[in-house]
């Protein structure tokens, strides 16, 4: 019933910018946290940024000062504004949401992934 739909990936030159979006479909749930992860070729999936409900944002050291995570709870959407992109940012970016309700336990949901390629 719940799906996370990502958009905004693409090919950009070093120093460029992209904004990723991820919207959670469905209704009747509460959002406990949303965030972004990425996985580059030959690497483990790593946390990029998270924004828990009522909590503090958290960023990987490699993206601090360049990326900004934000949420629009009315739209159940999380964004990742990526500036000053570097080739090492190239990866598949995955949206994650922690959702729950009175009828079911908290569960992790993942988006389908969107490719970000930074190359000249």
Image (spheres, rainbow, N blue to C red):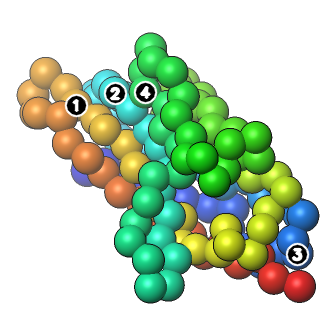
Residue at the spot x=87%, y=71% of the render?
Answer: 14
Q: Residues within 10 Å of mark 1 (few under 14, many from 20)?
A: some
* Closer to the eye: label 1 or 2: 2
Marks 3 and 2, Cα distance to the nearest angstrom?
Answer: 35 Å
Q: Mark 1 highlights which residue?
A: 100
Question: Is residue 79 among the parts visible in the rendering?
Answer: no
* Closer to the eye: label 2 or 4: 4
Q: CB of mark 3 within 8 Å of CB of mark 2?
A: no
Q: Mark 2 highlights which residue?
A: 32
Q: Residues within 10 Å of mark 4 (few under 14, many from 20)?
A: some
Of callouts 2 and 4, which one flags the residue occurring earlier in the amino acid sequence? 2
Residue at the spot x=76%, y=40% of the render?
Answer: 65
| Callout count | 4
Q: Mark number for residue 83?
A: none
Q: Mark 3 highlights which residue?
A: 13
Q: CB of mark 1 within 8 Å of CB of mark 2?
A: yes
Asked which secondary structure carries label 4, the reply is strand
* Closer to the eye: label 3 or 2: 3
Of callouts 1 and 2, which one flags the residue occurring earlier in the amino acid sequence? 2
Of callouts 1 and 4, which one flags the residue occurring earlier in the amino acid sequence? 4
Residue at the spot x=55%, y=47% of the render?
Answer: 60
Residue sitting nearer the eye, 42 or 5: 42
Residue that protrudes farthest toward the front in the picture: 61
Q: Mark number for residue 52?
A: 4
Marks 2 and 4, Cα distance to the nearest angstrom?
Answer: 6 Å
């Amino acid at each position: 019933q719940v799906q996370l739909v990502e958009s905004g990936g693409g090919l950009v030159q070093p120093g460029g910018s992209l904004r990723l979006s991820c919207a959670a479909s469905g209704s009747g749930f509460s959002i406990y946290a949303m965030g972004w992860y990425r996985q580059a070729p030959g690497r483990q999936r790593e946390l990029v940024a998270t924004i828990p409900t009522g909590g503090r944002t958290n960023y990987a050291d490699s993206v601090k000062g360049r990326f900004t995570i934000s949420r629009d709870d009315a739209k159940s959407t999380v964004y990742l504004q990526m500036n000053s992109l570097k080739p090492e940012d190239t990866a598949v970016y995955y949206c994650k949401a922690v959702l729950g309700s009175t009828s079911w336990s908290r569960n992790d949901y993942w988006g389908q992934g969107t490719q970000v390629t930074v190359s000249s």
